[in-house]
């Protein structure tokens, strides 16, 4: 038990990299303050439903001390009682003495631990969803800005037909949109454990209300609403099903795969010197090689994303071994794995925002690479142009085949530039189309509908998907990185 009121879930990620909001969400203040609010909501609902012995004064004392947590007393109580929940029951009772006798009335420990977890998980997902919307918005703006800039496409990381820088970015945006959908779905699917008692039978509450089943159901529904949930899980054992943690973590793991893919693409493009992540004026890329501009932010994204992806294994295994009504071997594991997933996703999103908002594009490098490959890709256009001028298709194919092999030999064996076009200009056979060669080699004629696809995608898919998150996008702040 930490005595520091600002102490939080302790992780290498927390103090150095996580956002203040996410760190606070997993802090002791948030957790134990939420416990007190749950005890208050329970007592309030029990009084509203006619349970004797809960005075208005007791409720006022509870309400006035929801955040007045003496962590030193709580730590001493836990050392003595060896039970974290009961330690906080007693600590709360010291500052709300008129309520001491009714705090936790009818409840089991999982009333506060599980319900608080669900509240904390919901709030964590809200933070992540808002950040993801900001990243999607920023990357969409990048796609729009570069929707018409031709670039060499790659399949198997080998030169392929041209695309555009903006169209490639929409491939990233599309996957992030699916992550946004999945996170929102998981957030909306989160229910409340509610008021279920020791093994989920509500026996203790049935006894409190003298066998009135309707009152017990009303209590469950009322505490659920007071705690900010529309629905609670209809049945549970001592805990809510740990399958819920699987559903919660799955979209975060899936987002990890998306983030890793995007960061890897940017790292590949950085190697080609076509696109780079932001690199600050005094930043050092290598202690030995002063010229280097290592893609350190994207490398961090990849590193943390791998961690994020594998955390799903913890909750899957935990869900699979919950014996009967429950076993306690879930507790220590999930206190690490679920917060770690939220903290990691938070850091990845912050870093992604920083990268996306500072992406640097080098059009001249891109154009040079296109010039090196486009002549080979344009051979079919050359053949068609010759045929239109009366040429024989098979003869033209043979002529350009020979010239293409000669040009390829210059590139591969001599390390020279692709001189296919110069060879075509020097071959009398192709004289009928010499004046057309510049037009035939215009990169803009090789990008198909890429610009129109970007427009259509942003208008019909991105804009509607981001509309519910307009406030989060409008309130975005620059993504500050610790290092």
Image (cartoon, rainbow, N blue to C red):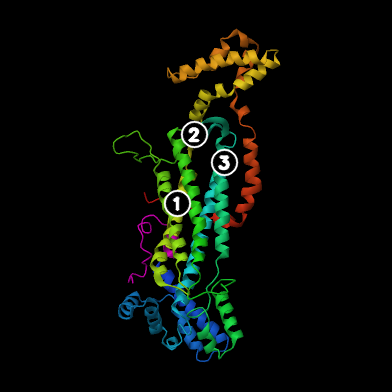
Magenta highlight on residue 403: no
Of callouts 2 and 1, which one flags the residue occurring earlier in the amino acid sequence?
2
Could you say where residue 466 lies in the image, as x and y percent from the top left? 60, 53
Determine whether the residue tagged by mark 2 lies in a helix, strand or loop: loop
Determine whether the residue tagged by mark 1 lies in a helix, strand or loop: helix
Residue that appears at 52% across and 85% down: 203
2 or 1: mark nearer the eye: 2
Could you say where residue 406 lies in the image, as x and y percent from the top left? 50, 15
Determine whether the residue tagged by mark 3 lies in a helix, strand or loop: helix
Q: Is residue 77 above or below residue 151?
A: below
* Residue closer to the observer: 38 or 482: 38
Q: Residue furthest left?
A: 288
- Identify the disc placed on residue 157: 2
**Quarter of the rendering containing residue 153:** top right
Q: Is residue 470 above or below residue 263?
A: below
Alpha-carbon span between mark 1 and mark 3: 21 Å
Which residue is under mark 3?
143
Of callouts 1 and 3, which one flags the residue occurring earlier in the amino acid sequence?
3
Could you say where residue 254 lies in the image, as x and y percent from the top left? 51, 53
Q: Is residue 480 visible to us here?
A: no
Of callouts 3 and 2, which one flags the residue occurring earlier in the amino acid sequence?
3
**Quarter of the rendering containing residue 21:** bottom left
Q: Quadrant of the N terminus?
A: bottom left
Q: Which residues are magenta?
A: 1-26
Which residue is under mark 1?
348
Residue that appears at 57% across and 34% down: 164
Image marks 1 and 3: residues in contact by CB distance under 8 Å: no
């Amino acid at each position: 038990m930490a005595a520091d009121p600002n102490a939080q879930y302790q992780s290498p990620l927390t103090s150095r990299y996580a956002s203040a909001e996410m760190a606070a969400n997993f802090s002791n203040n948030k957790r134990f303050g939420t416990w007190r609010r749950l005890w208050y909501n329970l007592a309030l609902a029990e009084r509203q439903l006619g349970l004797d012995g809960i005075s208005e004064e007791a409720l006022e004392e509870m309400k006035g001390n929801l955040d007045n947590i003496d962590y030193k007393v709580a730590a001493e109580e836990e050392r003595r009682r060896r039970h974290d929940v009961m330690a906080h029951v007693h600590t709360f009772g010291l500052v709300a003495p008129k309520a001491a006798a009714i705090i936790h009335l009818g409840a089991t420990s999982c009333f506060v631990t599980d319900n608080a977890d669900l509240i904390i998980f919901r709030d964590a997902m809200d933070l992540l969803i808002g950040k993801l919307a900001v990243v999607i918005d920023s990357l969409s703006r990048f796609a729009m800005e570069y929707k018409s800039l031709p670039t060499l496409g790659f399949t198997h990381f080998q030169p392929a037909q041209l695309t555009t820088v903006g169209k490639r970015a929409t491939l990233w945006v599309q996957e992030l949109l699916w992550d946004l959908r999945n996170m929102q779905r998981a957030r909306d699917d989160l229910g409340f454990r509610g008021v279920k008692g020791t093994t989920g039978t509500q026996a203790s509450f049935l006894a409190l209300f003298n066998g009135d089943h309707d009152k017990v159901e009303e209590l469950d529904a009322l505490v659920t609403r007071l705690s900010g949930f529309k629905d609670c899980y209809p049945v549970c054992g001592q805990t809510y099903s740990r399958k819920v943690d699987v559903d919660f973590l799955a979209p975060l793991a899936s987002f990890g795969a998306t983030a890793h893919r995007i960061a890897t693409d940017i790292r590949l493009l950085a190697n080609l010197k076509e696109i780079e992540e932001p690199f600050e004026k005094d930043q050092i890329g290598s202690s030995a090689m002063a010229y280097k501009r290592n893609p350190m932010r994207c490398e961090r994204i990849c590193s943390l994303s791998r961690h994020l992806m594998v955390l799903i294994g913890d909750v899957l295994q935990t869900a699979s071994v919950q014996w009967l009504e429950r076993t306690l071997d879930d507790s220590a594991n999930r206190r690490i794995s679920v917060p770690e997933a939220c903290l990691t996703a938070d850091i990845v999103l912050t870093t992604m925002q920083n990268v996306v908002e500072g992406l640097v594009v080098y059009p001249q490098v891109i154009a040079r690479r296109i010039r090196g490959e486009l002549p080979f890709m344009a051979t079919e256009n050359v053949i068609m142009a010759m045929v239109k001028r009366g040429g024989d298709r098979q003869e033209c194919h043979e002529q350009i085949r020979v010239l293409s092999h000669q040009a390829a030999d210059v590139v591969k064996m001599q390390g020279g530039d692709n001189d296919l076009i110069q060879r075509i200009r020097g071959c009398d056979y192709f004289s009928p189309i010499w004046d057309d060669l510049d037009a035939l080699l215009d990169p803009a004629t090789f990008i198909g509908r890429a610009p129109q696809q970007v427009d259509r995608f942003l208008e019909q898919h991105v804009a509607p998907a981001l509309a519910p998150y307009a406030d989060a996008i409008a309130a975005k702040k620059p993504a500050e990185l610790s290092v």
